Amino acid sequence: MEDKILFEIKESHLDTGLRGFPVGTCGTSKVDPTKGLSYRGYFIKELARKRPIEVIYLLLNGELPDEEQFKQFHEELLTHYVDDPGLVKHLDSLPKNSHPMNWFISALNYYGMIHNTKDWRKDALKVIINIPTLVARIYQVYYGWERINPKPELGYMENFVHMISPPNKNPKLIDLMNVFDILHYDHGGGNLSTFVGKAVSSGHADMFESLIGAMCGLAGPLHGKANQECFRFIQECYDAIGTPDDEQVIIDYLEKLLASGKVIFGFGHAVLRVEDTRATILYELGKEISATDPYFNLALKIRTAGTKLLSQKEKISNPYPNVDAVTGTLLNAMGLTDSNFYTVLFGMSRCIGIACQIYHDRVTARNGKGNPIVRPKYIYTGPVR
Ligand code: AMX
């Protein structure tokens, strides 16, 4: 079989953060520069309005389930469901002034210590079925909300939405969470958090240890925490200009920000060269569930004004909105107003995609041998004595 050359590595590549280096294979999802995200060959727009468990089944097994397979899978997942009272005690002991991502990482660690089976499939199932309850418990304790007990029989995201009780909770929060969860499961293998999770598991750390590594990666402001920054950006724009009818007012305002060295949050992407298809889905959903919200309306106006402005800047590879351009406005409009928590919601979903990838890396890759330990080379640049 021909052993094709995929990439030529030059010295100048050493400073690029492995940008674009092929380092392995990923069978669950793909990010195409012009067609956007797909899971197992299905474009995300074909999946966004399905039931979350159907899409998780697809990521894990490679095909969408029929009704019987769906039922069996859901029943199997529920056998792994546990609402551990020790978790709430653990959360009660955490410092209230720390970031919710630190709580999420700590909760995963607690959960792994108690419930880890060291069986990759079982642990992936445990992550899938329990992570919304774990996040709901964090919400309850962190914000001092009512500690509503779970009702897993309600459905996957339904149970999550049932357990959280933000003031002014919008009844359409469930519509948003179903779509939000599906959109954020997987994004190829090379995004920082997924890459880290896969790398940690390659040393045979367990599923929970691997996800903790991944979520520490997600917590960085250049990666997952960008979604909270993007919403703050919309809030700042709103405070400065409101929702003007004249597009030029928005363009002038954004131009001033660029001139002062700031970035237009929610625009640009390392891989995509079109509007992020996840953003397109959320703009459409927002028109259904959040049409009168002022932040959402401003985000809609910035969608076109920002693209017009950034298209004139040659150095910017992708002048279009990414998924974070709009998520915060919708979460906020549905009652989840504290943007500090948005990365945790992203993590709740992304852990599922990473767990599915890790399962395949460890159990099905290389005819069941599993992928080898990750061991890249860093070139020594210190003194020679
Ligand atoms: N506003 C202002 N400048 C931007 C820009 C934006 N939205 N997007 C890119 N640029 C600039 C870069 O800073 C870079 O400038 P430099 O050469 O002076 O350093 C130049 O354009 C070229 O960058 P690029 O090749 O187009 O993008 P990248 O792959 O280096 O970076 C990203 C991608 C997302 C970090 C960048 O577009 C950005 O900072 N966007 C704003 C922040 C944001 O929305 N983050 C969320 C990311 C979404 C996600 O992946 N979850």
Image: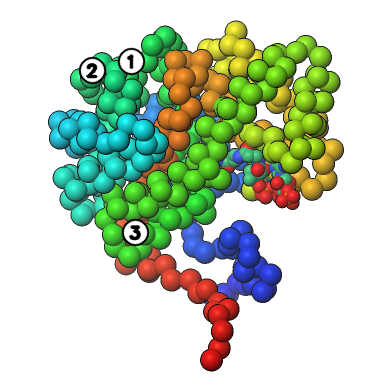
- Residue 128 vs residue 75: left or right? right
**Secondary element at image label 1:** loop
Question: Which sits earlier in the primary sequence, circle 2 or circle 1?
Answer: 2
**Residue 257 location, x and y as percent?**
75, 33
Q: How would you rate the neighbour count of disc 3 (Cα within 10 Å): few for under 14, some for 14-19, many for 20 or more?
A: many
Assign the N terminus to one quadrant of the image.
bottom right
Relative depth, front residue between 356 and 142: 142
Q: Is residue 279 visible?
A: no
Q: Quadrant of ligand 1?
A: top right
Relative depth, front residue between 4 and 171: 171
Q: How would you rate the neighbour count of disc 1 (Cα within 10 Å): few for under 14, some for 14-19, many for 20 or more?
A: some
Question: Which sits earlier in the primary sequence, circle 3 or circle 2?
Answer: 2
Q: In which quarter of the view is residue 71 placed? A: top left
**As shown in the figure, which amino acid type bears the numbered disc 1?**
Ser
**As shown in the figure, which amino acid type bears the numbered disc 2?**
Ile
Q: In which quarter of the view is residue 361 placed? A: bottom left
Residue 201 circle label: 3
In the image, which is nearer the foreground, mark 3 or mark 2?
A: 2
Q: Which residue is mark 2?
A: 148
From mark 3 to mark 2, how far is it between C-alphas? 34 Å
Task: In the rendered view, tell whether residue 22 sits above or below residue 146.
Answer: below
- State yes or no: discs 1 and 3 in contact (Cβ < 8 Å): no
**Secondary element at image label 3:** helix
In the image, which is nearer the foreground, mark 1 or mark 3?
A: 1
**As shown in the figure, which amino acid type bears the numbered disc 3?**
Ser
Q: In which quarter of the view is residue 45 placed? A: top right
**Residue 314 location, x and y as percent?**
83, 45
Q: How would you rate the neighbour count of disc 2 (Cα within 10 Å): few for under 14, some for 14-19, many for 20 or more?
A: few
Q: Which residue is mark 1?
A: 165
- State yes or no: discs 2 and 1 in contact (Cβ < 8 Å): yes
Residue at x 50%, y 41% (from the top left corner):
224
- Residue 288 vs residue 245: left or right? left
